[in-house]
Amino acid sequence: MATKHTVTDSKGQVHTRTSQGRVYSHAVVTHFKAQPADGNWRERPAYTHCEWRSRLDLAEQCANGARNSSTVDSVEIIPAVRS
């Protein structure tokens, strides 16, 4: 039986995940800044990435790693809702 997990971040964007064998308790939502164009890359707009974790301590480890990056605007740890 598949389990659906849903979170809504601070910007109102909904992130969902369906899993057969895992139950996720938290989502780490990383908001990246827009990047200007340079010699090798085209301009990149701001975007959001969501990673799912089964325990709060694992979510905090993931968030701490993302917070050290200069391209990250903000990081949220959000409890997942199962349906």
Image (cartoon, helix red, strand yellow):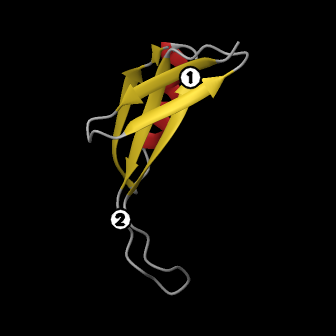
Residue drawn at point x = 56 percent, y = 17 percent? 24
Left or right: residue 36 compared with residue 54: left
Q: Position of residue 77 (x, y in %)?
A: 39, 26
Crowdedness of circle 1 by 10 Å Cα count: few (<14), some, many (20+)?
many
Give the Cα separation between the discs numbered 2 and 1: 26 Å
Q: Percent x, y for residue 44?
A: 44, 70
Residue 21 placed where, x, y %? 73, 15
Element under label 2? loop
Q: Residue at x 35, y 32 (%)?
A: 76
Q: Which residue is under mark 2?
A: 34
Rendered position, 24 above or below 31: above
What amino acid is labelled 2 in the image? Ala
Q: Taking the image as drawn, is residue 60 in sight?
A: no
Reading the image, the residue beneath label 1 is: 53
Instruction: Evaluate whether residue 65 shows in this view.
Output: yes
* Percent of width and height locating residue 39: 51, 87
